[in-house]
Image (cartoon, grey):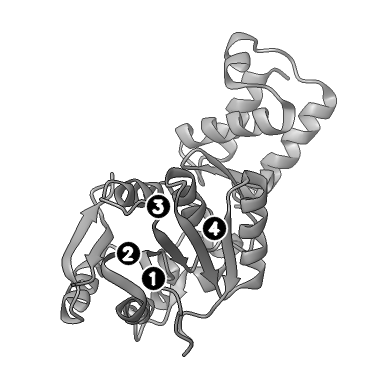
Amino acid sequence: MFLNEVQKKWEQGLAEIYDQREVKNIFSLVLEDMLAISKSEFLLNNRALFPNELTCLDEVFLRLSHGEPVQQIIGFTYFDDLKISVSKDVLIPRPETEELIAWICEHEIPDSPQIIDLCTGSGCIALALKKRIQTASVSGIDVSESALTVATKNAQSLRLKVDFHKHDVLGKDEFLNQYDIMVSNPPYIPENEQRLIAKNVLMFEPSIALFVSSADPLLFYRRIAELAQESLKSSGFLFFEVHELFAIHVKEMLQNMGFVDVEIKKDLQEKDRMIKARKGE
């Protein structure tokens, strides 16, 4: 079979899971990572596949057809121009989180800021901020030791100095440090919305990083805001990624807790997905 024939087979066979554009992107990514065939090479040379190459692609196709994310199959994804390793123990970084990174960096930041990423997962937020703000001291915390193993591996492979350690933000322990920026993409999907979530996400990404009790969907935001009241420097910033349906509720909660300049920002899909707040002086 030729390359374009296999791509057409993928487009047809995966149509119920991905749209055509996504399948083309996935196919290109697999070719480059597993067969060392770049996108430009494929476009210029629609060659026949060797038997071992066809076997490799058939195996990947089968896993994709069962809903397994391509990022977990190849073991990584790209996030803010960083190659981030992922596994079943961490969420796959999403494009809207890249928008959060860009928004943070639009603000006036001290020369050597102290930054902490809460519920860090793969460490993508902390690592992207460290790369963009090289003078920053950056740390990340998570309750999952498996996630911290992935985050530490990413820091090492990217040669970015970010300290990752275990901490339960819902626990009673406070932070000793004072931070210029606190940021979090915490669990924010109410458990009663599980039926609305794509099957491949439910099957292959950690529920602990996705879901929060339906009885208290602002649980993580409230607790992190409480930590920020104690550990954020005067005029320091708190940034969240949020559930679009709860953005206004998070904003009102932060205002009631005494934060100022609270702002909701839409993502490129015009959804209310980010919030910024500043600690008063």
Give whichever of discs 2 and 3 has the lower sequence position. Answer: 3
Amino acid type at circle 1 is Tyr
Of circles 2 and 4, the one toward us is 4
> What residue would you read off at disc 3?
97
Give whichever of discs 3 and 1 has the lower sequence position. Answer: 3
Question: Is the C-beta separation of discs 4 and 3 under 8 Å?
Answer: no
Question: Is the C-beta separation of discs 1 and 2 under 8 Å?
Answer: yes
Q: Residue at x 71, y 25 (%)?
A: 36
Question: Is the C-beta separation of discs 3 and 1 under 8 Å?
Answer: no
Q: Which mark is residue 188?
A: 1
Give whichever of discs 2 and 4 has the lower sequence position. Answer: 4
Q: Residue 265 at x, y = what percent?
A: 22, 54
Question: Is the C-beta separation of discs 2 and 4 under 8 Å?
Answer: no
For the residues labelled 2 and 4, the Cα–Cα distance comes to 18 Å
In this rendered view, identify the residue nearer to me: 91 or 182: 182
Residue 7, by quadrant, is top right
In the image, taking residue 147 as reference, residue 129 lies left or right, namely left
Neighbourhood count class around disc 1 (C-alpha, 10 Å): few under 14, some 14–19, many 20 upward = many
Q: Where is the N terminus found, in terms of image quarters?
A: top right
Q: Is residue 280 at least partly visible in the picture?
A: yes
For the residues labelled 4 and 1, the Cα–Cα distance comes to 18 Å
For the residues labelled 2 and 3, the Cα–Cα distance comes to 10 Å
> What residue would you read off at disc 2?
242
Q: Residue furthest front?
A: 111
> What residue would you read off at disc 4?
123
Neighbourhood count class around disc 4 (C-alpha, 10 Å): few under 14, some 14–19, many 20 upward = many
Neighbourhood count class around disc 3 (C-alpha, 10 Å): few under 14, some 14–19, many 20 upward = many
Give whichever of discs 1 and 2 has the lower sequence position. Answer: 1
Callout 2: helix, strand or loop? loop
Callout 4: helix, strand or loop? loop
Amino acid type at circle 2 is Val
Q: Where is the C terminus found, in terms of image quarters?
A: bottom left
